[in-house]
């Protein structure tokens, strides 16, 4: 179960029901507490701090400038045909896709990494197509469990 | 040099394009013939002028300008939404009807050289693995989500 009283992130539960990894929310410069996790990326196991964002459908999403010196994995997308990624404001930007390993506390997973290139502008979608965002001002009032395999979200009263 | 205020400028523009009647065309002269022509032209101008007051006309015209400005904004927004299609988009559109009937919401891996749909899946990796399982010579594809203008949400 996940506790929200101390701003803890308990990202994954083991079969025994206990999390294998648990960290405090990090306080950002603007004063807000955020669920930021340190992960190891690519062949060189480079450490990256990333926002745990359940609205993001990619395995890991980074900007091109952020990983220029990291060998993240095998490129699996066509150079001239980037993958369209929609931002929260409806802007569509192209990304290159990589097959890579991302690990946390020894748990290694093969995922796709989307490397967003802001120079690859692919237009906008209609705002009507956008999904409203349910943010942490609401979610932090509960213990939230994302059941990844079952594709379910469970809310517990704190 | 004094610049006209926005309202005066709009009024001048409206007079120029014929939405508002132009001011009297003939200056006052001493010639009696000029005076008669001036009177005739002014009568004709008056007859052409609708019966609603100038103030109402100006209000209507300003409303029309506002509507036109809104229309321009809408068109600009539509222009922004319209993206420049890539080769992958053209290939997708070739199979669009079939894909949207049979694989709606799935991700497809598109081989841009053979112009074929190479693989299907619920994620990019699934589509990629499906594509490479079928043909081993290629390992880079373009990806599209069937029925949508984007693959990932960020």
Image (cartoon, coloured by chain):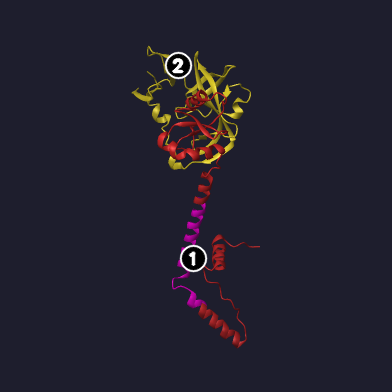
Chain colours: A yellow, B red
- Percent position of residue A65, x then y: 61, 29
| Residue B69 part of the magenta-drawn span | yes
The residue furthest bottom is B32
- Percent position of residue A32, x then y: 48, 28
Residue shown at the point (60%, 27%) measured from the top left: A66
Q: Residues within 10 Å of mark 2 (few under 14, many from 20)?
A: some
Residue shown at the point (56%, 85%) measured from the top left: B36
The span shown in magenta is: B45-73
Mark 1 touching mark 2, by CB under 8 A? no
| Secondary structure category for the residue under label 1 | helix
Do discs 1 and 2 share a chain?
A: no
Q: Which residue is mark 1?
A: B58
Using the numbered discs, state the Cα–Cα distance from disc 1 to disc 2 in whole angstroms: 68 Å
Query: Of residues A97 and B36, which is closer to you in this image?
Result: A97
Query: Is A144 placed left or right of A35 in the picture?
Result: left
| Residue A138 part of the magenta-drawn span | no
- Percent position of residue B114, x then y: 56, 33
**Height in image: A146 above or below A94?**
above
Q: Residues within 10 Å of mark 1 (few under 14, many from 20)?
A: some
| Secondary structure category for the residue under label 2 | strand
Q: Which disc is residue A22 wearing?
A: 2
Query: Is B96 placed left or right of A69 in the picture?
Result: left
Query: Is B129 placed left or right of A2 in the picture?
Result: right
- Residue A49 visible to the viewer: yes
Query: Of residues A12 and A74, which is closer to you in this image?
Result: A74
- Residue A90 visible to the viewer: no
The residue furthest top is A16
In which quadrant is the N terminus of chain B drawn? bottom right
**Height in image: B6 above or below A78?**
below
What kind of secondary structure does the magenta stretch mostly adopt? Answer: helix
Residue shown at the point (51%, 44%) measured from the top left: B81
């Amino acid at each position: 179960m996940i506790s929200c009283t101390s701003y803890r992130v308990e990202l994954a539960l083991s079969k025994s029901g206990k999390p294998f990894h648990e960290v405090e929310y990090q306080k950002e410069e603007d004063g807000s507490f955020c669920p930021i996790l340190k992960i190891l990326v690519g062949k060189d196991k480079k450490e990256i701090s990333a926002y745990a964002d359940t609205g993001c459908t990619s395995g890991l999403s980074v900007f091109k400038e952020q990983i220029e010196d990291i060998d993240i994995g095998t490129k699996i997308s066509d150079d001239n045909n980037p993958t369209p990624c929609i931002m929260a404001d409806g802007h569509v930007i192209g990304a290159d896709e990589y097959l890579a390993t991302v690990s946390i506390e020894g748990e290694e997973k093969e995922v796709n990494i989307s490397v967003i290139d802001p120079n690859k502008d692919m237009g906008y979608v209609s705002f009507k197509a956008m999904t409203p965002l349910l943010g942490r001002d609401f979610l932090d009032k509960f213990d939230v469990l994302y059941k990844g395999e079952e594709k379910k979200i469970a809310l517990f009263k704190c | 040099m004094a610049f006209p205020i926005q309202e005066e400028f709009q009024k001048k523009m409206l007079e120029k394009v014929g939405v508002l009647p132009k001011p009297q065309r003939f200056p006052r002269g001493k010639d009696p013939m000029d005076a008669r022509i001036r009177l005739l032209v002014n009568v004709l101008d008056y007859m052409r002028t609708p019966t609603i007051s100038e103030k109402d006309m100006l209000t209507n015209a300003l409303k029309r300008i506002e509507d036109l400005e809104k229309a321009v904004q809408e068109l600009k927004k539509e222009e922004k939404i319209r993206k420049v299609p890539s080769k992958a988009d053209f290939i997708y559109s070739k199979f669009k009807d079939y894909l949207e009937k049979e694989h709606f919401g799935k991700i497809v891996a598109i081989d841009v050289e053979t112009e074929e749909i190479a693989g299907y899946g619920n994620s990019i990796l699934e589509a990629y693995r499906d594509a490479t399982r079928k043909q081993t010579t290629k390992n880079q594809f373009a990806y599209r989500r069937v029925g949508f203008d984007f693959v990932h949400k960020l």
